[in-house]
Image (cartoon, grey):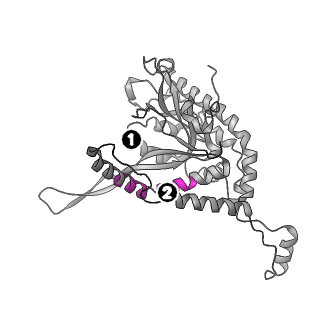
Amino acid sequence: MPAIQQGAHREGTDGGSKDLSRIDHGYEYPEGLNLRPGSEVHELVKNRVMERARASHDVMKRRFDSWNRIDETLTAYIPADEAERIIQKKDSRKPVSIIFPYSYAVMETVLTYMTMAFFQDPIFRYEGRSSEDTIGAILLEKVVQHHCMKTKVELGLHTMLRDSIAYGLGPVAPTWIEQHGRIPVRLPGSEEVEWEEGLLFEGNGLSNIDPYLYLPDPSVPSHRLQDGEFCGWVDRTNLMALKGSEANDEDVFNVKYLNHIKGRRSFLLNTEKSARHMKSGVNTGNRASLMEGITNPVDVVYMYVKIVPREWKLSDKTIPEWWFFGVASDEVVIEARRAEFYHGMAPLICCSPEF
């Protein structure tokens, strides 16, 4: 297995990134594993995840040129040409050409029909198979609909459909969302109230994946991602968000090591070729450059991988199973756990109406 060099994260220690293998923050890792940066297991997991991310990105980026042309076609704003700008500069009241974007209008028409057809409450409907299941199915439907309203699932589905019409695929990840905050607690035998950190809400949500940052297994069709060996994406987040996740989620670790890394962007975003910034501001990579030094952006490669745990030195099991990994800044493994779901699949969906 070749070692993959993602960048200069470990070059130099004077004002730059430090050698993480020399630092010990005293983490206790799941299932007795040694996932401290620099350890054999940590480096094995990191390299294999990033190797798959690079291979997938190399295939997906071949679509970017055509996607950029689609982005330009589907814009609702068409800039004036040089001759019309000169006219407006002389007299802003003079009329110029009005361009009606037919492709954009057609897409919005199809999207409007699909939202009207599928977004009728409740969006997800359940019914029992037998009489004793009837009440449970009704209650489940109510709970899921409440989650959809609270976490704005309709907006995620709308974006999924829009991406699938424009790019041919709309990837999303069903997630479990937890919102933490301060909760008033009345002291026993007193009228006084204390404020404590606690869980305000938890429920199902839907997270959209940017098609430009989607990392599927290119050996299988887009609508059959469960047949592939891996599927992932790049997430643009920030250091404070990851520290909050580590504090509230026992599955997240090693975030403290990111304090010692200078430049926490992924090589995948450095090579992102989206031209959406030409019409709508700045693209993902440029936005990160503008905020560097003011905030602490972090790129995380999340990936579900079907592995034989013994071959990855994660356990003695020899039967393939889905695992979930998160690699921050291309350098630090911050999540590594079995994807233990009843359905036995990777919880990812790709809407592919024209596959």
Q: Quadrant of the C terminus?
A: top right
Report the residue marked by disc 2. Answer: 154
Q: State the extent of the magenta-drawn residues as a range.
A: 142-159
Mark 2: which secondary structure? Answer: helix
Q: Residue at the location (51% across, 18% down)?
A: 311
Please state the total of marks drawn on the protein image.
2
Alpha carbon distance from label 1 to label 2: 26 Å
Query: Relative to residue 1, is residue 250 drawn left or right?
Result: left
Report the residue marked by disc 1. Answer: 249
Of helix, strand and loop, which mostly describes the magenta segment?
A: helix
Could you tell me residue 256's position as x and y percent?
46, 38
**Label 1 packing within 10 angstroms: few (<14), some (14-19), many (20+):** few
Could you tell me residue 135's position as x and y percent?
28, 50
Q: Residue at the location (71% across, 58% down)?
A: 74
Q: Quadrant of the N terminus?
A: top right
Q: 163 above or below 23?
A: below
Nearest to the observer: residue 242 or residue 234: 234
Spot the residue most to the right.
Answer: 83
Query: Relative to residue 18, is residue 242 drawn left or right?
Result: left
